[in-house]
Image: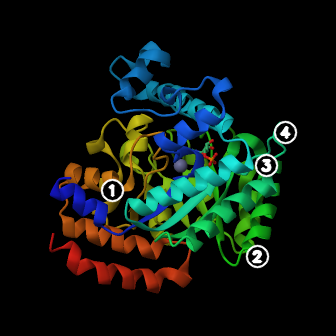
Amino acid sequence: MEEADLFYRQLPKVELHAHLNGSVSFSTIEKLVARKPHLNIEHGMTAIRSGQRRTLDEADIPIICQRKRRRGQRAGCFVRTRRRCFQVFKVIHQLVDTEEDILMVAKDVIREFAADGVKYLELRSTPRKEKTTGMTKRRYVETVIEAIRQCKNEGVDIEVRFLVAVDRRNGAEVAMETVKLAEDFMLSTGGLVVGLDLSGDPTVGHGRDFLPALQKAKNCGLKLSLHLSEVPSQADESELLLNIPPDRIGHGTFLHPEVGGSQSLVDKVRKHNTPLELCLTSNVKGQTVSSYSQHHFLYWYQMGHPSVICTDDKGVFCTDLSQEYQLAASTFNLSQEDMWTLSHKAIDCTFAPDLQQQLHQKWLELQPTLFQL
Ligand code: IMP
Ligand code: ZN
């Protein structure tokens, strides 16, 4: 391993934006495929490897995407590409449909983040009911919590908290039920469930439909992390959702005026100092950002705004958090000290205030050895 790789692997890190089923690694997929050979699923159907960005363009995206992108044509292009990404989750969900699968997947994902030097992880996942296997949404969440507890008992060196996810595709009524479920678990798990996520295909539904559920979640003490302005033309929705306000923002790709957002959206984010969860490879491979150097990380980082580097779906996008830190450093010419500060500041953006002091301590203990590499 090269010295720079080793630095980013050993750098203590905080992961705040990781969807459970998007984080499933190649080796876990292999185990799942062996359990369900009848599904005829190959790894190429569950991950987008490097260089596959172009394949997405060519395979399914209308011809306008291959022409020089003119402003008015961009939205349609993004929509089709994102949809393609969401097909991948459907395949993974077929492979992960029993409590046994969830337990294995969650434990593997937690261990992998720990092996990558992540000291604090917030996992998020959408509770799923599977008629064929008898899995209920409640058992789904219980199983993820069980995985977190088992990893802790086995001495895996990582603190894990859980966000219950609302998939916007399922509408307002399901969102409200999910908030109730999340509240129950927040109260019964001794603080392992800390918040609610709003995610799913951003081109489906409108954020206004979820306002009552999100407001209820906030009122009962759940922290809110909302996928916001992930695709263009969501300015109205973002305006509404930022009024709640959320505790963190996922992506926020099209918030700023240079990409069709507005100063008023930026001002709202700045006013509440709402941290952004930024996922470079996810956005480049999902084609909401044209290249690493064009990523909005720089816009927010240069402003000194709380910006946390995350993976989103490390399995689907074939990455890990060390690699994302290294990519941000090389793309934006940041030093190892800058990256240290970035990972250290991420602690203040977690939804576990009770752990923050302990995490700061850990970072300070690890600092001398890291910089003697
Ligand atoms: P799960 O919730 O653990 O099943 O993880 C997969 C789910 O996360 C997908 O079905 C989406 O609802 C959500 N998801 C993963 N990546 C993204 C993203 O980039 N944008 C919005 N939603 C996402
Ligand atoms: Zn996400």
Q: CA distance from mark 1 to mark 2?
A: 33 Å
Q: SS for tag 4?
A: loop
Q: SS for tag 3?
A: helix
Determine which residue is flagged by label 1: 322
| Pair 4/2: label in front | 4
| Pair 1/3: label in front | 1
Q: Quadrant of ligand 1?
A: top right
At horizontal 68% and vertical 64% (from top left) the residue drawn is 146
Determine which residue is flagged by label 4: 131
Q: Find residue 98 and report its horizontal and vertical position in percent.
A: 73, 45
Q: Is residue 132 above or below residue 345?
A: above
Determine which residue is flagged by label 3: 172
Query: Does label 4 or label 1 sit earlier along the sequence?
Result: 4
Q: Find residue 36 and report its horizontal and vertical position in percent.
A: 66, 32
Tag 2–tag 3 contact (CB < 8 Å): no
Query: Does label 1 or label 3 sit earlier along the sequence?
Result: 3
Q: CA distance from mark 2 to mark 3?
A: 23 Å
Q: CA distance from mark 4 to mark 1?
A: 38 Å
What amino acid is labelled 3 in the image?
Ala
Q: CA distance from mark 1 to mark 3?
A: 37 Å
Q: CA distance from mark 4 to mark 3?
A: 22 Å
Q: CA distance from mark 4 to mark 2?
A: 27 Å
Determine which residue is flagged by label 2: 187
Tag 4–tag 1 contact (CB < 8 Å): no
Q: Find residue 373 and report its horizontal and vertical position in percent.
A: 15, 69
The yes-or-no answer for disc 1 within 8 Å of ligand 2 is: no
Tag 4–tag 2 contact (CB < 8 Å): no
| Pair 1/2: label in front | 1
Q: Find residue 263 and report its horizontal and vertical position in percent.
A: 43, 55
